[in-house]
Image: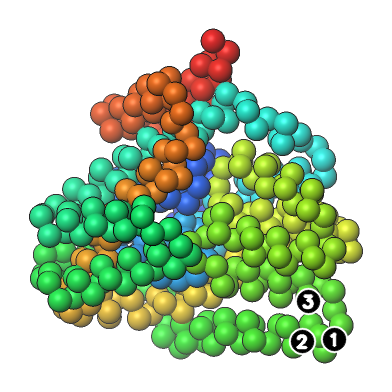
């Protein structure tokens, strides 16, 4: 069957997959940078959703446990092409880094020896430009007036001064409370998001999420199954971490090192490799699964643990979708969302400094390279993947001078 003859949902899912795959190959810099790449591709370039809807989606995923950027990608895919689109978006964005890390588990690459490579530092610098561009664009749309701009700045200040595991959630909640009490919800009307999930399926997904969270440990002990114990450990890590990215690493280390599934040296080596690949850091789970000798095939083990750590995200997004439009249409909730969106701008602004800026801009040459990358994005409208390649090359050139 020719692509043009495929059902509309299938054609759109294929389109989602290829767009997400390109993002998965070029999105360096961690979850905050990923949100910048997503905004440029899905909102600015392709106009699959408007700025307010994208911001609402980011706010929703900030509330949920799991990898924020991956959840946003899944949600965008669902709005574009239904459940199949959500799967396509996840596959495209996740597959490149998962394959690379499983390959590293086989020992076919020595990425850990490249920690000081110039091109790798260039990838850190381009993350500064991407996040700065995202902050600039979102601030103009989501914090355009004095009250919301003030709220965004206060959110950034709070996060920079109060860095705890719960600070981000607290800032979002306070932003929502201030928006509910002090802002008018008529000022930022978002287009309704097409929900591909019926209400009954949303309720079933939430029930399954909690059912697995409680039932997997019991089932693993009852059946004395090593595979179920591994699946439970990774599922629990994906279910209980807020903020995603580096936050999940201590949880995973506590799950896989003490039982003897993997040595701490191999864990650290894999973490170093994960810094050099694009896409979500949660794909580190694929490396860990491939390194557990008690499981069968390395490839299958890697895919097994990868599915376990991302399954909670699918269930939570599926559970939230049927109720999201109704909440967004409610005037008091819209006011709260205006405050939440301003707080999200502040979260991005704080992340622009720590950890993005502080890990990348350590010399005048780095600032010059980042400024050039920002100009390519903001002024010359160069495609982000091209800016990534050019900045990586610039980092390597600077290192050789």
Residue toward you, 23 or 140: 140
Q: Is residue 365 above or below residue 102?
A: above
What's the residue at 49%, 42% (across, down)? 29
Local SS, label 3: helix
Q: Earlier in the sequence, mark 3 or mark 2?
A: 2
Tell me how far mark 1 sits from mark 3, CA to CA. 9 Å
Q: Are marks 1 and 2 in contact (CB under 8 Å)?
A: yes
Residue indicated by mark 1: 223
Q: Is residue 133 left or right of residue 146?
A: right
Q: Are marks 3 and 2 in contact (CB under 8 Å)?
A: yes
Q: Are marks 1 and 3 in contact (CB under 8 Å)?
A: yes
Q: Is residue 214 left or right of residue 322?
A: right
For residue 135, the mark is none
Residue indicated by mark 3: 228
What's the residue at 36%, 55% (across, down)? 161
Residue 208 location (% of width, % of height) = 58, 84
> In this figure, which colouring scheme has been used for the structure?
rainbow
Q: Earlier in the sequence, mark 1 or mark 3?
A: 1
Residue 251 location (% of width, % of height) = 64, 65
Farthest residue toward the front?
161
What's the residue at 32%, 66% (across, down)? 171
Residue indicated by mark 2: 219
Residue toward you, 367 or 324: 367
Residue 327 in view: yes
Residue toward you, 233 or 4: 233
Local SS, label 1: helix
């Amino acid at each position: 069957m020719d692509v043009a003859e495929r059902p509309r949902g299938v054609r759109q899912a294929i389109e989602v997959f290829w767009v997400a795959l390109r993002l998965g190959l070029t999105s360096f810099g961690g979850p905050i940078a990923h949100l910048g790449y997503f905004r440029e591709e899905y909102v600015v370039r392709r106009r699959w959703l408007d700025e307010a809807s994208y911001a609402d989606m980011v706010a929703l995923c900030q509330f949920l446990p799991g990898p924020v950027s991956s959840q946003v990608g899944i949600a965008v895919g669902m709005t574009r092409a239904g459940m199949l689109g959500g799967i396509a978006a996840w596959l495209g964005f996740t597959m490149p880094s998962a394959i690379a890390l499983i390959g590293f588990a086989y020992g076919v690459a020595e990425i850990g020896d490249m920690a000081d490579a110039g091109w790798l530092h260039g990838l850190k610098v381009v993350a500064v430009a991407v996040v700065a561009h995202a902050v600039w664009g979102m601030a103009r749309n989501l914090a355009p007036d004095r009250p919301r701009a003030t709220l965004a700045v206060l959110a950034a200040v709070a996060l920079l001064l109060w860095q705890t595991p719960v600070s981000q959630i607290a800032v979002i909640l306070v932003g929502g409370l201030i928006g509910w009490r002090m802002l008018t919800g008529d000022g930022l009307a978002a287009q309704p998001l097409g929900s591909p999930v019926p209400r009954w399926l949303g309720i079933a997904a939430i029930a399954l999420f909690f059912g697995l969270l409680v039932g997997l440990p019991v089932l693993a002990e009852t059946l004395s199954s090593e595979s179920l114990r591994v699946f439970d450990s990774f599922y629990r890590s994906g279910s209980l971490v807020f903020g995603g990215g580096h936050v999940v690493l201590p949880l995973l280390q506590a799950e896989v090192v003490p039982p003897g599934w993997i040595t701490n040296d191999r864990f650290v080596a894999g973490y170093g490799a994960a810094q050099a690949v694009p896409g979500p850091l949660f794909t580190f789970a694929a490396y860990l699964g491939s390194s557990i000798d008690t499981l069968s095939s390395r490839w299958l083990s890697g895919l097994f643990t990868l599915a376990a750590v991302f399954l909670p995200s699918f269930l939570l997004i599926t559970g939230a979708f049927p109720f999201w439009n109704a909440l967004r249409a409610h005037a008091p909730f819209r006011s709260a969302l205006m405050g939440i969106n301003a707080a999200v701008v502040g979260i991005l602004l704080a992340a622009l400094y720590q950890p993005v800026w502080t890990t990348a801009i350590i010399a005048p040459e780095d600032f010059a390279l980042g400024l050039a990358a920002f100009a390519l994005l903001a002024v010359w409208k160069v495609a982000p993947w091209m800016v990534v390649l050019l900045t990586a090359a610039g980092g390597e050139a600077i290192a050789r001078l």
